[in-house]
Structure formats: C-alpha cells, structure tokens
Image (spheres, rainbow, N blue to C red):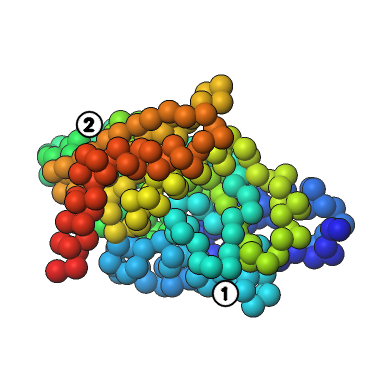
Amino acid sequence: MIPQKLVIASRESALAMWQAEHIQSRLRALYPGCEVSILGLTTQGDRILDKTLSKIGGKGLFVKELEQALSDGRADLAVHSIKDVPMVLPEGFTLAAICERESPFDAFVSNNYQRLEDLPAGAIVGTSSLRREAQLRARFPQLQVAPLRGNVQTRLAKLDQGDYAAIILAEAGLKRLGLTQRIRHTLSPADSLPAAGQGALGIEIAAHRSELLPLLAPLNHAQTAACVTAERALARALGGSCQVPLAAYCTEQDGLLTLHGLVGHPDGSVILREEAQAPREYADALGRAVAKKLADNGAQELIAAVLAEQAT
C-alpha cells in the first residue's frame, strides 16, 4: 500500500537539503501518486560551530533532532550522510536503505597549490576530523593542521579569505553541490583513508514503521550496503566515534569485499593499518575481523590513550 504522503526529515544545510531533495525526487519517480515533502531542521551540530566535533559529543549531534521528528510522527524518514550516523543507532530506529555511493574519497582544495606535496613547510591545512588530521600529520609532518568547522560554503569562505593554505573536504559533498571545480586533487586511500560510510546516503526510519521497508527497498544499493556494513562493523567493534582517528574503506570486486582499516593518534605518531577479504555475505564478520586484527596490533590501547588525553 503506497501512502498518500511521505515527509523527509533533513538538516537545513545546503548539502543536507540536496541529499533530501535527491531522495525526494527518487521517491516521486517511484510513487507518482505520493506527495513527498521535506521537513528542514537545525541540529545541535549545526548550531555549535566554535568547537571540534570530538570536543562536543561527536556524530550523534547531527541526527538527534531528526530522530525526534521520526519518533513524534512529524516525519516518516530521515536522510543522512552515513558517515554522520553513530555506529550504534538508538533503540527504536533502523537504517532502511543505504543508497549508491558517490565518491568515498577526501579532496584537496586550495587556491594556490595543486597537491599536498606542493605545500611549503609550515603551511596551514584546515580539516574538521581527527581521522584526516592523524593521517595528514603522519604523511606530511612539516605541515600545520588547524580545526575547520561549518558547512561546505563556510569552510570554502575561510579558505578564500586566507585563513588556510588548503583545506580537506569530502569529495562527495563538493560534487553534490556542483563545486567540482574547487577540487584540486583527489586524495588516495594511502594518503587519507576515508571514514566509514563516506560518500553514501542512509535512510533512517522508526523501527515500528516496518511498512516503509518495501517502499524504500528500491533505494537500497546492494554493493554499497555491503561495503558500508563492513566499514561500520569495523568502527563499531572499536567503539568508533569522532573522538578517535579511525578510518574504514571497503571495495568489492566480483562479490569479494576488501576492507582496509586504520586507527591512529591525532599527532600522527602512531598509525595502525590492517586489511582482509571476505565474500559479500560476510560483510559484518569482515568488519569485526579487521577490527580484531587492529586490536591485536594495539588499537584498543591506542584508543584508550587518545580518549584519556582528550579527557584531561
């Protein structure tokens, strides 16, 4: 039974609204008789812009208000960038679909330089994540890394006014906003292994709304869902959050998943990497297996040390 109307909850940033409108257009095409509208909401993560995510509570800050709208019936589904979704959803919510991925990679953005290798010693690079910071400091210790918050347009404005020599942003967001021309260079996974779920959109619903699952199933992309499942399982097994430099990136070829995982210290002094392969149907187990390899290599102790340092 196709409902007469569906309401999508979304953050109000330009990128979040693009994402919601993308899902809106796909649902309208699938169900022409259904009225699909968007409920724009401002989240706590959008309001607090003077502190890094790791200092103010992490990923959940971008989804709680949207989940409240699902819970109280103001919205039927919420559209998220999967990398903003906590690894463990609150009780009463579920991911109904993971859509086909845009680029999972990070982008180098600068007005004066083509690549990270071109930056002079002491140049300031802006980034919003400890994951990027740790890898940048390890690979390019001669550079300075400084915090960078705000939406995509705000971050680009800070670059343009000369606060930074370069900034690192998710390539997917720039492409979705029609800002591909700002990308000077796409960072390889060797230079900047992506965050779990980076580049993919997820659709969240209240768990009791199971009647929505068949309606949203056509939006699920099996290959992306398998890769993201493996990435999130790795991060979940290590207690992954914004407060720890943690990366997970999975690819698939001929039904075989290859998962790369990374845990580091924010200062770049320690970077642990592991990888493994498994068939698509074992995506969750693959994530846990790579997490165990990282743990056996000292990841848990490293994570505990990073969290202890942040608490002081």
- Badge 2: residue crowd in 10 Å (few <14, some 14–19, many ≥20): few
**Coordinates of residue 155 in the picture (x, y in percent):** 37, 55
In the picture, measured across the screen, residue 238 lies left or right of residue 221, that is left
Query: Hey, what amino acid is under mark 2?
Result: Glu
The answer to whether mark 2 and mark 1 are in CB contact below 8 A is: no
Query: Which quarter of the image is occupied by the C terminus?
Result: bottom left
Which residue: 64% across, 54% down? 96
Most foreground residue, 215 or 274: 274
Q: Nearer the viewer, mark 2 or mark 1?
A: 1
User: With respect to residue 221, does 91 lie above or below?
Assistant: below
Q: Which residue is mark 2?
A: 117
Mark number for residue 68? 1
**Residue 141 in view (yes/no):** yes
Query: Hey, what amino acid is under mark 1?
Result: Gln
In the picture, measured across the screen, residue 187 lies left or right of residue 93, that is left
Which residue: 27% across, 35% down? 273
**Coordinates of residue 160 in the picture (x, y in percent):** 33, 51
User: With respect to residue 77, does 105 lie above or below?
Assistant: above
Which residue: 30% across, 34% down? 274
Residue at the far top in the pictured view: 254
User: With respect to residue 206, does 159 lie above or below?
Assistant: above
**Coordinates of residue 231 in the picture (x, y in percent):** 44, 43
Query: Which quarter of the image is occupied by the N terminus?
Result: bottom right
Quarter of the view holding residue 223: top right
Which residue: 54% across, 38% down? 226
- Please tell me which of labels 2 and 1 falls first in the chain: 1
Quarter of the view holding residue 36: bottom right
Where disc 1 sits, the SS reads: helix
- Badge 1: residue crowd in 10 Å (few <14, some 14–19, many ≥20): some
